Amino acid sequence: MINSIYQLVAPKSIAVKFEDVSFGDKVLIQPRYMAICHADQRYYQGRRDPAVMRRKLPMALIHECCGQVLKDPSGTFAPGAPVVLIPNVPGHGPEGVYENYAAGSGFLSSGRDGFMRELVDLDPDRVVGCAGIDPHVAAMTEFVSVTCHAWHRFTQAAHAKRDRIALIGDGAMAYTLACTLSVLMPQSELIIIGHNADKLALFSFAAERYLTYEAPEDLTFDHAFECAGGEGSAAAVQFVIDHIAPQGTLMLLGVSEQPIPVYTRDVLEKGMTLVGCSRSGREDFERAIEVLRHPGIQDRLRQIIHVAPAVHTVKDVKQVFALDLQTPFKTVFEWGV
Amino acid sequence: MIFGAILAGGVGSRMNIESMPKQYLPLAGKPVFLHTLEKFLLCDEFDAVYIGTHPNWVDFTRDAVMPYVGSAIDIHVVKGGSDRNGTIMSIIDAIEDDYGPSPDHIIVTHDSVRPFVKLSTIKGNIEAARQYGACDTVIPATDTIVTSQSGDQIDEIPPRSAMYQGQTPQSFNIDQLKGLYASLTDEERASLTDACKVLVLKGVPVRLVPGDVTNIKLTTIMDYKVAQAMIESGVDA
């Protein structure tokens, strides 16, 4: 059958590509709800290096999505089953290397078509059931899975004293990570450091919250997660280096577009461990679904979701990306093409 | 019950292709009408999908749909009538033979030569037919419409904002459509260009369902070439 693929062909310019999809051995899914990631917005606005834009476009955006199974020859999912879609295309690495880092891994919406399509066909292992989860929240499961991946890698890397955990940043990533850690590490105190009082106010379940410039000089914590990214990356990393306890682990989640300086003298002196985290794999998606089923978590995540009007046309796509620029956290919308 | 009705009775005279009606021409590696059928088979609300085809093409069509037989939705190939509404009535007769009559049966009729139809449009039709009894898929007119009885000079230029272009699917409560069609005079039947007009002539409301500019009908060679170009290069829809 003919599938419609809504591709970004140039900054702020979407064209529909048509492609035949056959009934094969893949799961056919109708995307239903999507969430916009900063990465999508950067491509849409053309805020990536021109060489990168030339290499990756045209492609369909969006990698945070839930949908409904239309057909599954493997019998894993019944027609109509609500599912979340895994955008990671696993690579083939040596034992112990995660699927999202392994050589040859790919990502739908980074050089390959993302989920802005009428129909999506995926291998059964790239689909996870999400029955019972509010579809507006299920749409951002990929985002939650990234925080689950960071948690998992943290458990592998950090020493056992985990009483006080700092999160640097007060955006959607920090908030979602805080939600995840509140479920997976309920004994740890969460300390949030951010720039915006109104955003910090949402972290009501954290033990301590500080505006960056008001943080006490003697503030300390065992480990930290950096969720600032962008131009704030360098300052966030330096803040952690200044305040973290000896042999603390710093998990890096924020994306800096440019190289940033790291004061290695103090990193060495404190014996710190720095761990980079990006994307996620199937296990992280499964854990994310468990986190979302935890009482109260969906309510918390709904606080950062702005539900935009449904998207039916190319014009609507443009409007939802414009709207996303005005929303402080996550924009979620129904995909009705 | 909900039934799909794919209208494949045309013989392609406007294509100037003698050998093969347009619904059987290849597009992206398979006959046009199979793209349409596959989209219908994705909609699990259907109990069965009927294909109404020209008597000469029944066997060919049955052979072509064999790979899809055994899927969750039953597929039937039936001989069409002498015109569009005749084919719809043939399909309705077959539905009632196979599944029995019911005041709740709904039929979603669709041109086999509109392979770009979206699943959301089909589902929108089912929802509207359930709620309102009949619906038509339309898009706002982009060209100014001019009316002329003589063909020589303009009678009227109606406001474009009130003009729409009809597409398919068109969906109906079977009982209502059948009853109204039976009540038409020969003259009224001769005036029909589509099935919705059966209801409009009798003053029965037909709900509008938003269509899509890409849901084009492959009527001429140019349409066919446009469809091929759409698949190769995409469109700024």
Image (cartoon, grey):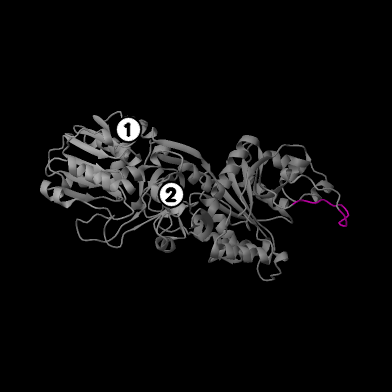
Q: Residue at x 54, y 56 (%)?
A: A16
- Nearer to us: label 2 or label 1: 1
- For the residue pair B206 and A240, the one nearer the viewer reads as A240
Q: Position of residue A117 (x, y in %)?
A: 48, 52
Q: Is residue B225 above or below residue A23?
A: below
Q: Secondary structure at mark 1?
A: helix
Q: Position of residue B18 (x, y in %)?
A: 70, 71
Query: Which numbered tag is attached to residue A200?
Result: 1
Q: With B133 as the anchor, is B75 left or right in this view?
A: left
Does the segment drawn in magenta span residue B149?
Answer: yes
What secondary structure is the magenta-colored segment mainly?
A: loop
- Amino acid type at circle 1 is Leu
Q: Reading the chain from its start, which is encountered first: label 2 or label 1?
A: 2
Q: Position of residue A139 (x, y in %)?
A: 40, 42
In this figure, which residue is indicated by the disc labeled 2? A41
Does the rendering let one see residue A313?
no
- For the residue pair A329 and A71, the one nearer the viewer reads as A329
